[in-house]
Image: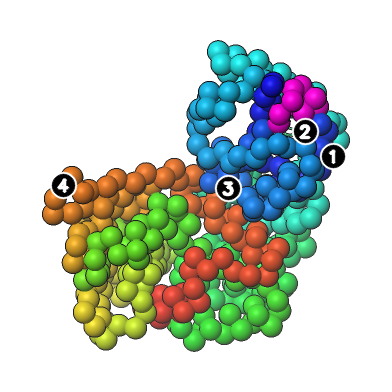
Amino acid sequence: MKKVITYGTFDCLHEGHRRLLERAKALGDWLIVGVTSDDYDRTRGKINAAQSLMERVEAVKGVGLADEIIVEEYEGQKIDDIRRLGVDVFTVGSDWVGKFDYLREWCEVVYLPRTQGVSSSEIRGVRRGVRLGIFGTGVVADKYRKEVEWVNGMSVGGQCAEFEAGVESLAGTCDAVYVVSHPRRHAADVRSALEAGMHVLCESPVALSGKDFRDLVSLAAERRLVLMDAIKTAYATAYNRMLLVVKSGKIGRVVSVDATCTSLMPPWQNPKDLEESWNSRQAWAPAALLTVFQLLGTHWERVRRKSFFAEGAEDFDLFTKYDFEYEGAVASVKVGKGVKSEGELVVSGTDGYIYVPSPWWKTDYFEERHEKAEENRRFFYQLDGEGIRAQLVAFSRAIATGRGPGNVTEAESEVIAELVK
Ligand code: CTP
C-alpha cells in the first residue's frame, strides 16, 4: 500500500484545498493529512486562523478523502511522521517548491500546482478585515504598526499623533484604534474613539480612576464595541503557562508574589521635560499588578504604596513600591524609571517556587524550582512580537465574535486604573 502525506492549516476550507487533497489522494492508496495546531501555526508566523484546530480538522474530515488525520505540533515533526507512519510520498502545493526537498532522504517529494485565485487569507480578509488606526507616536506605536503586518485580516488604516488631531480623525479610514497617547489623556481619547464608532485597544492604564474605567466599559457595551486593555504580558504563552503551573498546585499554596520592573530613563534637565513622559507607575505598574491579581485575586485586605518623586515634578515617581496583604499571602510590586533593579518575578509557594528571569514581563522562559533540585522543571515558549502579535489576533477575534478574550478582566483593569492614578 502506497502512503501519501500532506500538511496545511486548512482554514476556511476552500476549493484550492479540496483539489489539493484529491490530487494528493491520487498519488497513492492511503492519504494522511496533517493539520497544523494553533500553537504551531503561530510559531510559523501564520497566525489568526479564523477557525479553531477542531473546526479545521472537522472540515478536512468533511471532504471525505483523508484516511487518517494527524495534528502537526512541532518543528521537525514531518520527519518523525514519515518514518513512524511509513510514508512513501510527501506532497504540498507549489507555493512551497524547494522548501521540503530535505525530506527526499526519507520519501518521494511532489509539489502539486496551486489552484489559482483562491486562498484562506482572502476569505478571512473578506469576512473580517480590520483596519486599525494607531493613535500616538514613539517606539511602542511603531512596534504595533509592524506587528499588524503579521496578523491575517488586519491592516493599518491610519496613524495620527496626539498633538496633531483628535483620535476621531481616524474614524473615516479605521474600524478600530490602538490608543497610545499619554495616560493622562487615555480616558478622554478612548471615549472619543468609542463615540466615533471605533473598537479600542488602549495601552494600560486605560483610565486613571476605577470610575472612569467603568464608564468607558458601559459606553463600549452600549455601542456594541470592543474595549481591550493592552497589557502585552497577558498574551505571552509562557506567562499563561506559568499561571497554569501555579494554579495546578505544582508549587503548593502561593504565599508571596514579588514582581519588579524597572528601566532607567535618560537624564532630564528640567522637571517640565517629564510632563510628557509616563511616570514609573503608569509605565510599569499595570503588568506587575496584573500578575499579582491573576495569582492572588483582587480582594486584598490592605495595600500600601510608597513613592519617591522627582524634584519639582510632584506626580512623577522615580520609584514606587506597592505592598499587598491578603489572607494568607503577601505581594510586592516594585517599579521604577529612576531606579534600577533586577526585573524578575518570584512566586513563592509551600512546595516550591516559580522563577521568571529578567525581563519577566517579556517572558519566554520560566523555572519551577523545588527543595530537591531533581524535581526542578524548565519551560520555554517562543514569544513573537513581545506578545503584541497574539494580542492583535485576540483583538481581531473579539471584534469578530463580540466576546473579549479574558486575558485581562474588567475587574483587573478597574483596580489597575485605581492603583496607578
Ligand atoms: N493550496 C492549493 N491551492 C490554493 C490554496 C492552497 O493547492 N489555492 C494548498 C497549499 O499549497 C497547501 C494546502 O493547500 O499545500 C494547504 O494550504 P494552506 O496554507 O492551509 O491554505 P492557503 O489558502 O494557502 O492559506 P493562506 O492564504 O493563509 O496562505
Disc with the residue nearer the chain's start (3 vs 2): 2
Image depth: mark 3 or mark 2 in front:
2
> Residue 5 in magenta?
no
The Cα atoms of the two marked residues, 3 and 2, are separated by: 21 Å
Spatial distance from mark 4 to mark 3, Cα to Cα? 33 Å
Residue at image location 73% in from the left, 45% down from the top: 61
**Three-letter amino acid code at disc 3?**
Asp
Q: Is residue 145 left or right of residue 335?
A: right
Tell me if mark 4 has few (under 14), some (14-19) or many (20+) residues whose alpha carbon lies within 10 angstroms of its own: few
**In terms of image quarters, where does ligand 1 lie?**
top right
Q: Which residue is mark 4?
A: 373
Q: Position of residue 87 (x, y in %)?
A: 61, 23
Asked which secondary structure carries label 4, the reply is helix
Q: Which residue is mark 2?
A: 21
Q: Nearer the viewer, residue 241 or 213?
A: 241
> Which image quadrant: the N terminus?
top right
Observer able to see residue 398: yes
Coordinates of residue 79 in the picture (x, y in percent): 53, 24
Residue behind mark 1: 15
The first of marks 4 and 2 along the sequence is: 2
**Magenta span:** 23-31
Callout in the foreground (2, 1): 2
Label 4 is placed on what type of residue?
Ala
Residue at disc 2, secondary structure = helix
Q: Which mark is residue 38?
A: 3
